[in-house]
Image (spheres, coloured by chain):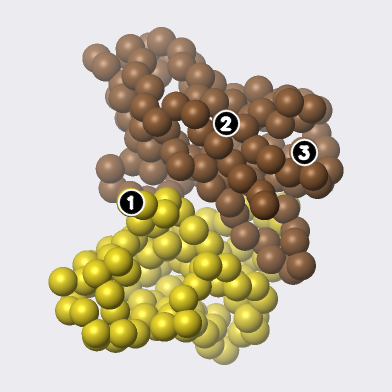
């Protein structure tokens, strides 16, 4: 079974500092896609960043970047220059075509608190 | 704003009742997904539709059903509701439902079963 593990239920960071959220996944597939979604208090699911497994280069979106280690099946999210608006639940998700299903498999989430 | 709309935003009902949740995908998207977010189960995939046809089923109960209409909007029907069905139900959409695509989520419908 495909699983996604986020080992940090909660994390905190000082405003303007950097924080890294961890994610590991389990798969025997070689082609797949990884995502980080943010869920603020409004409960909206917002895509933060995505990574294609076939790409060696780590994805970057402004202050958000990933450290993708395919052999270790690790996909961590780094948030630089943290802002108060970054406070949210962060979900790591994994997606692989499986019998026509393109479902996302989510981790349990990490609650990020940003302290002023 | 993702472009995916869901109605209603909130729904309060009683056990044993039936409700219908509605989702309109982003303009041009043919594939719709339903997810359930609950405290104990986290975010779970329920079902996927592509251009009106069911494409994949996840952890969807037999009491639940869904369909996608010719105008591509989708409805999730929940019947014989139980307390444990209280959750946030998300709809997401993507262009054709391929794995390299990003799924864009709607704001969700919060269901409370009393």
Q: Which residue is mark 2?
A: A23
The picture quadrant where one finds residue A30 is top right
Q: Nearer the viewer, mark 3 or mark 2?
A: 2
Query: From what the image shows, is residue B43 above or below residue A27?
Result: below
**Residue B98 shown left or right of residue A10 in the figure:** right
Q: Does residue B1 appear anywhere in the picture?
A: no
Q: Please state the horizontal and vertical placement of residue B109, each as a whole percent of the image.
A: 32, 66
Q: CA distance from mark 3 to mark 1?
A: 30 Å
Query: From what the image shows, is residue B35 above or below residue A9?
Result: below
Asked whether B84 or B95 is in front, the reply is: B84
Check the picture and name the quadrant holding the C terminus of chain A: top left
**Picture residue at 46% right of the left edge, 13% below the top:** A18
Q: Which chain is yellow?
A: B
| Image disc number at residue A53 | 3
Q: CA distance from mark 3 to mark 2?
A: 14 Å
Asked whether A79 or B95 is in front, the reply is: A79
**Residue B38 shown left or right of residue A8 in the figure:** left
**Disc 2 is attached to a residue of which chain?**
A
Q: Please state the horizontal and vertical placement of residue A39, each as a whole percent of the image.
A: 39, 43
Q: Which chain is brown?
A: A
**Picture residue at 50% right of the left edge, 25% below the top:** A21
The picture quadrant where one finds residue A24 is top right
| Image disc number at residue B93 | none
Q: Which residue is mark 1?
A: B39
Q: Does residue A22 appear anywhere in the picture?
A: yes
Q: Please state the horizontal and vertical placement of residue B59, each as a whole percent of the image.
A: 52, 67
């Amino acid at each position: 079974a495909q699983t996604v593990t986020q080992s940090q239920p909660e994390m905190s960071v000082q405003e303007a500092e950097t924080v890294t959220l961890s994610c590991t996944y389990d798969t025997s597939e070689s082609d797949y896609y990884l995502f980080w979604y943010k869920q603020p208090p409004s409960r909206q699911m917002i895509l933060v960043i995505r990574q294609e497994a076939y790409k060696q280069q780590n994805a970057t979106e402004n202050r958000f970047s990933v450290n993708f280690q395919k052999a270790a099946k690790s996909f961590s999210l780094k948030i630089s220059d943290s802002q108060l608006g970054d406070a949210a639940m962060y979900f790591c998700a994994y997606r692989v075509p499986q019998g026509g299903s393109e479902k996302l498999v989510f981790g349990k989430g990490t609650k990020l608190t940003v302290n002023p | 704003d993702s472009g995916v709309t869901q109605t209603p935003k909130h729904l309060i009902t009683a056990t044993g009742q039936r409700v219908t949740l509605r989702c309109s995908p982003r303009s041009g998207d043919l594939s719709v997904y339903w997810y359930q977010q609950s405290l104990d189960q986290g975010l779970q995939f329920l079902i996927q539709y592509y251009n009106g046809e069911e494409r994949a089923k996840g952890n969807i109960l037999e009491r639940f059903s869904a369909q996608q209409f010719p105008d591509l909007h989708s409805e999730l029907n929940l019947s014989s509701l139980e307390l444990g069905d209280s959750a946030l139900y998300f709809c997401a959409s993507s262009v054709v439902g391929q794995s390299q695509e990003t799924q864009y989520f709607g704001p969700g419908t919060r269901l409370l079963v009393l």
